[in-house]
Image: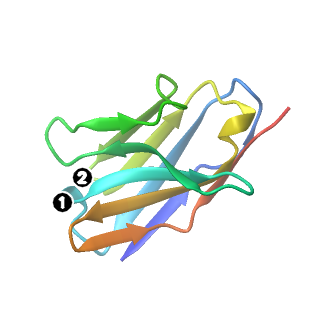
C-alpha cells in the first residue's frame, strides 16, 4: 500500500497550488479520501474530504471553504487538492489519507509554505 503526495511548494500569499496524491496497493474507489495538514507546532487537522458515492460528497473545514477544492480520479487512483487564495495560515505539511472501516492509509506528506 502506498500513498504519495506531490505538488507542495513555496508560494506567495494569494497564490494557488494543486496537490496530488497517487495511490497503489488497494482498491482506491472503495475508500473515502481526506487531506489533512499540520502547521508548525500544531496538531494535524482535516481540511477536506471526499466520499465514494457518484457524484461524491465533499466536506471542507471552515478555514478553507470557498478556497480549496478536493476531487478524485478513480481511473488514475489519484486525489487532488486545488488550493486558491493561499495565506500564511495555510502553511504546513499536507497529508493524504485513504479511509474506510478496517483500513486507514497515510502518505508521507508534502510541504506547503506560504510566504512573501
State which mark lies toward you, 2 or 1.
Answer: 1
- Relative height, residue 30 to residue 102 (above, below): above
Point out residue 15 in the picture as x, y percentages from the top left corner: 68, 27
Tags 2 and 1 in contact by the CB under 8 Å rule? no
- Relative height, residue 107 to residue 15 (above, below): below
Q: Residue at x 46, y 50 (%)?
A: 35
Q: Looking at the rendered structure, which numbered label has been put on residue 69?
A: none
Point out residue 38 in the picture as x, y percentages from the top left corner: 62, 54
Crowd class of label 2 (few under 14; some 14 to 19; many from 20; radius 10 Å): few
Q: Which residue position is annotated with label 2?
A: 75
Picture quadrant of residue 16: top right
The N terminus - image quarter = bottom left
Point out residue 53 in the picture as x, y percentages from the top left corner: 15, 43
Left or right: where 36 falls relative to 89: left
Point out residue 42 in the picture as x, y percentages from the top left corner: 68, 55
Q: Residue at x 74, y 55 (%)?
A: 40
Toward the viewer: 98 or 59? Answer: 59
Secondary structure of the residue carrying numbered label 2: loop
The C terminus - image quarter = top right
Left or right: where 77 falls relative to 40: left
Pointer 2 or 1: first along the chain: 1
- Relative height, residue 93 to residue 50 (above, below): below
Left or right: where 91 falls relative to 55: right
- Relative height, residue 82 to residue 76 (above, below): above
Q: Which residue position is annotated with label 1?
A: 30
Amino acid at each position: 500500500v502506498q500513498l504519495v503526495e506531490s505538488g507542495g511548494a513555496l508560494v506567495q500569499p494569494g497564490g494557488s497550488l494543486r496537490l496530488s496524491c497517487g495511490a497503489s496497493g488497494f482498491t482506491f474507489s472503495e475508500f473515502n479520501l481526506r487531506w489533512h495538514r499540520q502547521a508548525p507546532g500544531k496538531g494535524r487537522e482535516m481540511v477536506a474530504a471526499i466520499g465514494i458515492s457518484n457524484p461524491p460528497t465533499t466536506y471542507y473545514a471552515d478555514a478553507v471553504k470557498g478556497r480549496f477544492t478536493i476531487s478524485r480520479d478513480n481511473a488514475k487512483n489519484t486525489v487532488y487538492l486545488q488550493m486558491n487564495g493561499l495565506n500564511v495560515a495555510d502553511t504546513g505539511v499536507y497529508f493524504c489519507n485513504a479511509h474506510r472501516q478496517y483500513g486507514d492509509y497515510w502518505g508521507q506528506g508534502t510541504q506547503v509554505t506560504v510566504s512573501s
